[in-house]
Image: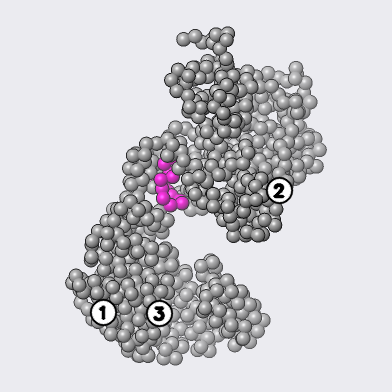
Amino acid sequence: MNETPPADEPGFGELLLRLRRASGLTQADLAEASGVSVRALSDLERGRARAAQRRSTEALADALGLTGPERSRFLELARQGRQRGARPVPLPPAVAPLPSAVPDLVGRTAELERLRAAALDAARTPGGVVVSVVGHPGVGKTALAATAAYALREEFPDGCFSVDLRGMDDQPVAPRAALDLLLRALGVPVEQIPVTVEEQTALFRSLLSGRRTMILLDNAADETQLRPLLARTTGCLTVITCRRALVGLESGRWIWLTALSQDDAASLVGTIIGHERTRAEPEAVAELAELCGNLPLAVRIAGNRLASRPHWTIEHLVTLLRDERTRLAALSAGDLRVRSAFAMSHRRLTGEARLVFQRLALIPGPAFGVELAAIATGLPEPRVRLYIDELVDANLLQAGAQDGRYSYHDLIRLFARERLEAEEDPDDLAKVRTAVVSYLLDTAMVAASLLHPEATKGNPRFPAREDAVRWLDGEAANWLAAQRLAARDGDHRRVVGLAEAMHWYSDVRQQHHPWDQVFELGLTAARALGDRHAEAKLLNFVGWARYLLMDDHEGGYAAHREALALAREIGDSVEETWAQGYLGAVLMRLGRPEEALEHSRVAAVARGLGFWAGQAPLRNVLGQVLTAAGRPEEALAVHRAVLADGELQRSEANPETYRFLRSLTFRFMGNAHVKLGEWAEAARAYRTERALFDEAQAPMDAAEAGLREGRAWREAGEYEPAVRCLRAALTAFTEPFSRWSRAQTLAELASVLELAGDAEASREYREEAAVLCGQVGTEAAERLAAELAGA
């Protein structure tokens, strides 16, 4: 084959230009379709580069729809161009100027302060200071660096210079070309610039010696490209922006950019389209920021689209972005495209790293570990760990706060799914997706089996109960999502199996997961299978979730009545007993104690259930009902008998079950003492409950016990212990979901301190409690707020 084309044969760039125009595509259109940057396309068409790399050439051919001889000719010209080498890229007339500063930079105050501190340190630090600004594509690295450079110009009287190293292009700027540019900017005549990189670096550093300069090395490729460009002279600040972590640099500081906060993202929209528009649609602005993943590039694109379409409402654009299938396409404005930013990083990945990047999008939850990644990719854990490290270094994945956990940015996950669907066989993907879902559900069932009260030994997958709980907690988002996918795909047996297995785990993580959804999915699947025993069991679970977790007492009552009728019909004595016990509990909450007693007494004396997995909790329900019915002495006798029998049968339960049952039983005894007006005895019972939860490392449960104890000590007139345990409870009630508990605790503290004579502290606690009541907004919170206002 001829290596030199005929005289009338166009070069690769000329052919590319002809084909693009014939197809009616702009450079931006072709860049989006192929993943090749607009700048690289411009260089090719203008002859500044002879040809693209093989992978980029194939992507261009695909985007142009080339087939047959036309495709072969296109690829051959590219190959010949690569063999002859690229023409030297002419230098721009303006040498090493700074990129434009962003006038509306928001949310980066702390990072700008760190760069300002680095600028001051550079003047007195031997070798100067190097700062690497690293982060996801589109997170605003160049915007931050350029804005800082303009703000800090007066600190560097000898000059501020910038080079775009084009690290994401097929051919990043070589160190020799970058040094040539910097030396010219420093006044070195072209003919006096040395030939070798080593000589250029030496001259560059000698010229900067004793000067106060700032060098911005934007869009770096890697450490090899950067090392010759580092000034290493006192007085020089070098700022690098890069998508990779650059962990191989021998020295330097790092600024890790993340997405904006939601408030800052919303503020950025306002600076682009005007705050009048954002004030008119605050909820839509918040959702717009969320759909953009708070990523500055995406938010800016969305803002630009709205600015160029003043007749659009923000809600209209939000509606367009809600569809995950078209969200990335909608996030484009002019030559700004979120997808293109991601594509540049994706194109530089190695082959198997690209596979891992895409396959991880099959994991249903937001975060994952190496074990689950190996299932999704089909690779051994040591190999997949290496590729995950590559993806983290490329900022296409982010390492989580918990060691060994990783996640995508939301928009990068959508891009990964796009590449997955575009590059892999649909049948193969379906098999892998099924494997991931099956693994999650099967493993969750194995782990949950160790939460059974009488499970005293581990299993090969989870040697100890703590291992099982740790896995269930850590992978909750994944197995919850997997159950929903299995329900959608008709894998009813696994959906039922998971729901049944989670019964005892739900007892120890009552407020952590949406148990009503888990059990409702199981119930629907049981009915689809025609499994009436599973249906009766899951009706009981659904009822429990409704009345205990959702305060839907009527809904819980209806579910348990249905479970009781079905269990009697099919002769399921176990579920009949449980339905009786649950009905006792829910009728007690409905204010019907006599009916509750009828059901509870039947459940408490039923046979066929083990002590730990049935008799003990059902007898405790009877005790609670007796207290509610105004018979607390009988209730205390029931609870004391449960404690005594628990001691006799302690060897049959695991330590956690034993401790959990005792803690609940002491709580119920405290409630009975309260009913009797025996406040000191109640406080001591709650103190034992609190100690048991502390021993179990359950801080929220311990704090709730502390609130009960503090209230009892106050009623007993013992203010000092009341203050101690209430203040201890406050240290746990710090999350948004615990606002109501915190408000109650603050109100109790205010009452105790008022009684103890500390009016000023009492007022402060009362005011904070009132604010929290307003945020909670329930009827109970409104009543407490009224009491606080009248105090």
Magenta stretch, residue numbers? 356-371
Q: Nearer the viewer, mark 1 or mark 2?
A: 2
Residue holding disc 1: 603
Residue 604 as seen in the image, left or right of residue 235: left
Q: Earlier in the sequence, mark 3 or mark 1?
A: 1
> What kind of residue is marked 3?
Arg
Residue 152 as seen in the image, left or right of residue 467: right
Q: Are marks 3 and 1 in contact (CB under 8 Å)?
A: no
Q: Nearer the viewer, mark 2 or mark 3?
A: 2
Residue holding disc 2: 104
> What kind of residue is marked 2?
Asp
Residue at image point 48% right, 27% down = 65
As for residue 530 lying within the magenta part, the answer is: no
Q: Is residue 35 above or below residue 661?
A: above
Q: Is residue 353 above or below residue 495?
A: above
Residue at image point 29% right, 56% down = 492
- Viewer can see residue 225: no
Residue holding disc 3: 667
Residue at image point 66% right, 45% down = 308
Residue 299 % position (x, y): 61, 48
Q: Is residue 123 above or below residue 701?
A: above
> What kind of residue is marked 1?
Ala
- Kindly state the secondary structure of the residue where label 2 is placed: loop
Residue 405 % position (x, y): 46, 50
- Kindly state the secondary structure of the residue where label 3 is placed: helix
**Number of other residues with Cα within 10 Å of mark 1, as a class: few under 14, some 14 to 19, many 20 or more:** many
- Kindly state the secondary structure of the residue where label 1 is placed: helix
Residue at image point 38% right, 66% down = 516
As for residue 362 lying within the magenta part, the answer is: yes
